[in-house]
Amino acid sequence: MKGFFSQRLQRHQKQMSRYLRYVFNDHFAILITFLMGGLGLYYSNFLKTLPRPFPQGGIVLLLIWLALLSVGKLATLVKPADLIFLLAKEKQMADYLAQALRYSMWLPFGVSFLVVGATMPLVVVVTEQTFASFFFYLGTIWLLKVTDLWLQRLSLYQGQEQRNNQRVLWVIAAVSSLLASLYVAPWVGLLLAVLQAAWFNLQCRPTGLLLGWDRMIHMEETRLHRIYRFINLFTDVPQITAAAKRRKYLDGLLNRMPFGQEQTYRYLYARRFLRGEQYSGLFFRLTLIGVLVLFFVQEWWLSLGLGCMFLYLIGFQLLPMYNEFQYMILTHLYPIEEGQKQTAINWLLLRLLGGAAFIFGVVGLFRAAILWQGVLVLLGFLLFTGLFLVFYVPARLKKMQSQ
């Protein structure tokens, strides 16, 4: 079964590598660079304003680290057909799940290393400890996460409804270990984490239990669906099917549009955006993230740069809508000029990007130290939107048509 899991893991990683090259493209890398730079500058300035020691900051660290422990689910890589074809191998599934658990540790361990390292300056301010305590905190987080994965593996077996209290005990152990690390001593928290890991190691052994195949398959499908939904923000994923919703409350917006042969694509694009989940969800999520980021930025030049990056990312992700009706036979039978498509997509992008630019500008006005800086940020967002529509969109659409 170990070799069987390795084969599945290779196929899974090969599939993910094909998608991730579209996720971590140049645009995403530039956005992350600006975002990390802006957040790092704000974080540095924020730490300078805090008194030393700052014990109240321990609550903030506790919440961050508890949220960190939720990162990383058990990746079993099981498939619906396993319910039939692997049922005879159930006794050997323990080795398979052991391999799955080891593989599932890599992501949370890596993320924990980065997050704990990023929070260490705040830890130094809160506790007046040295950066050498980083390894104690990291070890505590890792041990707590290993226990969490053990509990996730145990939940795959039948008859675990009576053992839900173990999850409650783990939460209590996690909170106690982290609080002891912050307010007593880092080594005390690490010691508590070692003790809870030893106790749960004895309690989480699924000896003599039967697998709940339906639950295990459902949990894996849910985990993969989250991954595919994230990838779907950057490229089309066959595993994610577009769903349309009625949204009767938006009929007023569509009814206000003029009807006519020259308005065909305008109506189709507007209806696709309002009734579909893919583009509307993407637009609102990126706009909300942009608002949250700009809210924590005070420097007007940094706010202008980050806002323009979010506007570019929103526009870039909405452009594939141009080909949404390429294979719709009625658009070829109906006597419509091809140029109407570009006019219609520009019409929609103008309203969406203009609205996002205005919202970003309002946030910039609210956070600006001087009024003229906020006005400059707002005008900069509107100017960028205009330049994006006039220069970038036509060139990008021409490239899409030639592909």
Image (tube, rainbow, N blue to C red):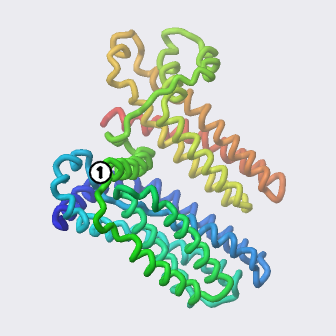
Q: Amino acid at mark 1?
A: Trp
Q: Nearer the viewer, residue 174 or 403?
A: 174
Give the residue drawn at x 25%, y 66%. 94
Residue 251 in view: yes
- Quadrant where the N terminus sits is bottom left
Towards the viewer: 291 or 4:
4
10 Å crowding of disc 1: few (<14), some (14-19), many (20+):
many
Residue 169 % position (x, y): 54, 69
Q: Position of residue 320 (x, y in %)?
A: 42, 36
- Residue at the image position 69 percent from the left and 75 percent from the top: 58
* Residue occupied by mark 1: 213
Left or right, 348 with respect to 370, comes to left
Q: Position of residue 72 (x, y in %)?
A: 43, 63
Q: Residue at x 41, y 33 (%)?
A: 242
Q: Is residue 102 left or right of residue 29?
A: left
Q: Which quadrant is the C terminus positioned in?
A: top left
Q: Position of residue 44 (x, y in %)?
A: 68, 74
Q: Quadrant of residue 147?
A: bottom left
Tell me if 63 is positioned left or right of 217 in this view.
Answer: right
Q: Is residue 44 above or below residue 349?
A: below
For the residue pair 243 and 322, the one nearer the viewer reads as 243
Q: Does the rendering let one see residue 343?
A: no
Q: Callout 1: helix, strand or loop?
A: helix
Q: Is residue 243 above or below residue 251?
A: below
Q: Quadrant of residue 353?
A: top right
The image quadrant that residue 338 belongs to is top left
Q: How many marks?
A: 1
At 56% from the left and 64% from the top, the residue drawn is 67
